[in-house]
């Protein structure tokens, strides 16, 4: 494995070597065998974090692994999962690990913490400052996808399995603004700047527009917004009723959570935040 870059301009040159970059979400909608058949050896496959969510066997194609960081460092490092994840990439086609930060407070892990593998670092914090909703952090896939579209316009960027839908096996973390991300991604797909595979191949509103070509698209969008608003209001009323029922249980849960010992991640973060000599 060759050395990987440590700054955005060099990473842009790295990705520009490929005709196609396929970003594979950790989603049941990502069909790995179908993706391998569809894209030839000129494509680079990019996987994220806990790849055992989507890979059942070793992957032998050109691949890059993105390891997202938190304030405690790279998630795979502090969870001691680097070896468990990298065993899915045993061949020479594996290019190494991209350690990514995309929100304020996240910090890199050093290359030697990844067990001697090729490691590069990509800081996209400033790229999303003032754009991504401030109270949330971009998902790794979204952060890399939008940056690639803007930094490598000649590369075909494909989203595989980016549905933002919870499954029976995997949950969605609420520290990401999923609605915002889906809006941006679908706008870029409609503009032809992103490709998307998996999930709903044809959104319902597209089907409505094709069925009734005499109705203006803005009218369809307005009516859809009215319907969604009414349904959201109904959902809010149901949630309020449910919360009134479970509120006593939530108070008890809060007491027990405060009594739990700190996790290893919390201890690492506190150690990183502690002033030197403190």
Image: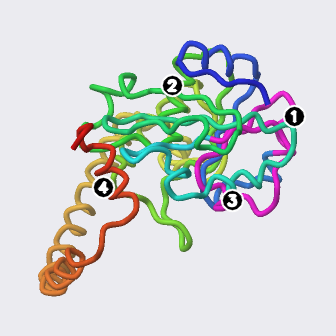
Image quarter where the C terminus lies is top left
- Classify mark 1: residues with Cα within 10 Å, few (<14), some (14-19) or many (20+): few
- Quick check: 172 left or right of 81? left
Q: Circle 1 sits on which residue?
A: 40
In terms of secondary structure, where does tag 3 sit? helix
Residue located 84% across and 37% down the image: 93
Separation of residues labelled 3 and 4 (CA atoms):
42 Å
Residue in front for this viewpoint, 55 or 81? 81
For residue 147, the mark is: 2
Q: Circle 4 sits on which residue?
A: 228
Q: Circle 3 sits on which residue?
A: 84
Separation of residues labelled 1 and 3 (CA atoms):
27 Å
Q: Nearer the viewer, mark 3 or mark 4?
A: 3
Residue 254 x, y percent position in the rendering? 18, 77
In terms of secondary structure, where does tag 1 sit? loop
Residue in front for this viewpoint, 252 or 237? 252
Separation of residues labelled 4 and 2 (CA atoms):
30 Å
């Amino acid at each position: 494995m060759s050395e990987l870059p440590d700054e955005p301009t060099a990473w842009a040159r790295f990705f520009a070597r490929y005709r196609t970059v396929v970003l594979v979400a950790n989603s049941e909608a990502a069909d790995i065998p179908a993706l391998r058949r569809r894209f030839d050896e000129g494509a680079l496959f990019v996987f994220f974090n806990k790849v055992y969510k989507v890979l059942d066997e070793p992957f032998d194609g050109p691949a890059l692994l993105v390891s997202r960081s938190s304030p405690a460092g790279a998630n795979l490092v502090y969870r001691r999962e680097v070896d468990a994840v990298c065993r899915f990439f045993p061949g020479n086609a594996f290019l190494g690990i991209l350690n990514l930060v995309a929100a304020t407070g996240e910090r890199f892990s050093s290359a030697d913490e990844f067990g001697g593998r090729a490691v590069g670092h990509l800081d996209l914090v400033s790229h999303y400052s003032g754009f991504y909703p401030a109270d949330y952090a971009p998902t790794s896939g979204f952060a890399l996808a939008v940056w690639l579209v803007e930094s490598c316009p000649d590369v075909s960027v494909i989203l595989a399995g980016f549905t933002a839908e919870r499954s029976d096996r995997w949950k969605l973390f609420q520290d990401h603004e999923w609605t915002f991300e889906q809006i941006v991604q679908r706008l870029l797909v409609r503009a032809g700047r992103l490709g998307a595979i998996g999930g709903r191949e044809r959104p319902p509103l597209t089907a409505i527009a094709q069925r009734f070509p005499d109705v203006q698209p803005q009218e369809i969008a307005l009516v859809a917004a009215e319907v969604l608003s009414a349904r959201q209001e109904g959902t809010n009323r149901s949630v309020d009723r449910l919360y009134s029922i479970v509120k006593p249980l939530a108070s008890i849960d809060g007491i027990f959570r405060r009594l739990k010992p700190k996790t290893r991640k919390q201890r690492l973060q506190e150690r990183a935040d502690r002033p030197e000599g403190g």
